[in-house]
Amino acid sequence: MANVAGDEQAWTRGYLGWLLDRGVGWAYGFPPETCNYRAEPVRIPVSSGLSRIELAATFYAPILSDGAEPHGTILVRSPYGRGLPISLMFGRKYASRGYQVLFVSCRGTFGSGGEFDPGHDEVEDGKAVVEWMREQSWYTGTFATVGSSYLGFTQWALLTDPPKDMVAAIIIVGSHDMGRWVWQTGALNMEIITWGNMVAKQGEQNSVLKKWINKLAHRDPFNSVLESIPLVQAVKAALPGKVPWLETIMTTTDLRNPFYAPRNLGTALERTKIPILLISGWHDIFLEQTMEQYFRLHERGCNVALTMGPWDHSGGGFTRLAPQQLLGWLETYLAKKQEAVRPEPVYYFVTGAEEWHWASVFPPPTDPYTLHLHSGNKLHREAPEPGTALSDFLFDPANPTPTIGGDRLRGKAGSVDDTVLSTRSDVLTFTTEPLDTDVEFVGRATITFAHSTSSPYADIFVRISEVDANGKSRNICEVYQRLDPERDMEEPLTLGLRWCAHRFVVGKRIRLLVAGGSFPHYARNLGVANPDNRGSEMKIVKHTILHGAAMGSTLILPKC
């Protein structure tokens, strides 16, 4: 495996490193550096059953003038290595501004002993690292944590039993419940397979080079695996023995299964009391969990701040805005160098208007803005005339509705041109006339309609998009749901879409799209029972939506 700690040597930043750090600091709007730094490889002993293993780590120590003390200690735990580029974002930039950083590789990754089993060992390993850190002569007595994605999960792991000397946390696009992310819709979120493939290959030589060659060539060799039926067998064959936990996740739908217990860190939301800065984006894969974290901590009266931008998962921590807020949070609560600088706890971006808003709480007060589904693919403020109307489409699992944009790890994520979806026969669209006044909504939109299917085994995908004067549309927010096979199809179906803040300006149109899949974001519903994703039988399913006056099929936006 690459970057093995035993092959590492201590080093002091030289001129080329100085140029690199200065360039990154300038690009992201950081204040000037205050010092040079030295990096030293270390090994941290932790328990592993009846034996002990060592975690590989790098300790960044600022080189300060005589008598000067570090501003504090920052702990980062990651499964993605400790070299470039991740060290730029979560190690070097803080060390060159007077902070100590202990950067630890999770077990089974980049020189750390043991086997990487996502989520399983992070609580125990986090405690062991903190205990070891306290024994070091360089420890400053208090520490903060920083990191994004899985690095956020490792922070929540510590907060299940908060250390008394942990004084702040910055969690960027991070989840606290891995199982729920994979199965919260009822359908397998296939981004976990993409992530598993990445984790399995990240230590291979030339893996980064291969990745960029494939990206430039607009190809992904792993696509053929995701498109295979049966799915589990294809993934297992493509990654033999490399990610044994992945097969269990793909086939274990019951979140009450003991397998998910160590991967559910919800207790941290009830126990933590320290100042926490949450940073995410409207198209992040963990948006729903970030909002849950904010709401629960806010309800408990914790010092919690939320920054929500227009980003997807790869963009939340790597804009000019987010790193500046990170440093401000550390200087306030770890270094104690300044008073809190945020005028309000919540800072969120309104897409469409392209504006940032400060707020004391989120969401702001809203009123329902109701749109009714009409015949002729129309959305209107007025209810339809008396009578019953219907629209239907066929979902063919052999030719599933494609994923375009949205909350993804792979492919083109975020807000993209999704006009092609409206041209497909397996997608229903309902669109307003051009708006004569701005419509801004903040919060969760809801859709209610009478919906039935020819097979009880079916999924539903609903998206709100914005259509411009040229007829091109871009996705705003969406929801995906695997329907309960035992549901009463006579009962209306109500779904809440993802959290959002968007302004439809005058002249734009609001579009509602309804489909039976979004592949390969979610495992296609085969139209037959397939509880463990090992099946191969497929059946075309007819979806029918009633939307006449008697049905009351509506889209409700929380309008500001």
Image (spheres, grey):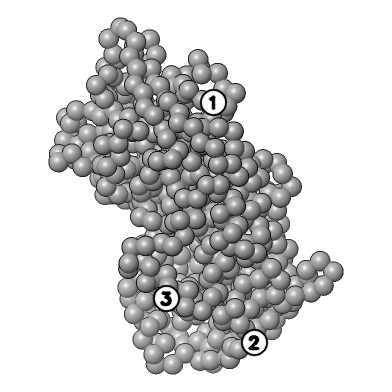
- Residue name at image x 45 percent, y 56 percent: 224
Quadrant for residue 188, please give it: top right
N-terminal of the pair, mark 1 or mark 2, is 2
Residue picked out by circle 3? 209
Instruction: Tell me whether the residue at label 1 lies in contact with that at label 2, contact meaning CB atoms closer than 8 angstroms.
Output: no
Farthest residue toward the front? 537
N-terminal of the pair, mark 2 or mark 3, is 2
Disc 1 to disc 2, how far (Cα)? 56 Å
In the rendered image, residue 75, in percent from the top left (x then y), is placed at 59, 71
Disc 2 to disc 3, how far (Cα)? 24 Å
Packing grade of label 3 (10 A; few <14, some 14-19, many >=20) is few
Residue picked out by circle 2? 6
Residue picked out by circle 1? 456
Disc 1 to disc 3, how far (Cα)? 45 Å
Q: Amino acid at mark 3?
A: Leu
Depicted 71 relative to depicted 252: above or below: below
- Residue name at image x 34 percent, y 33 percent: 427
Q: Amino acid at mark 1?
A: Pro
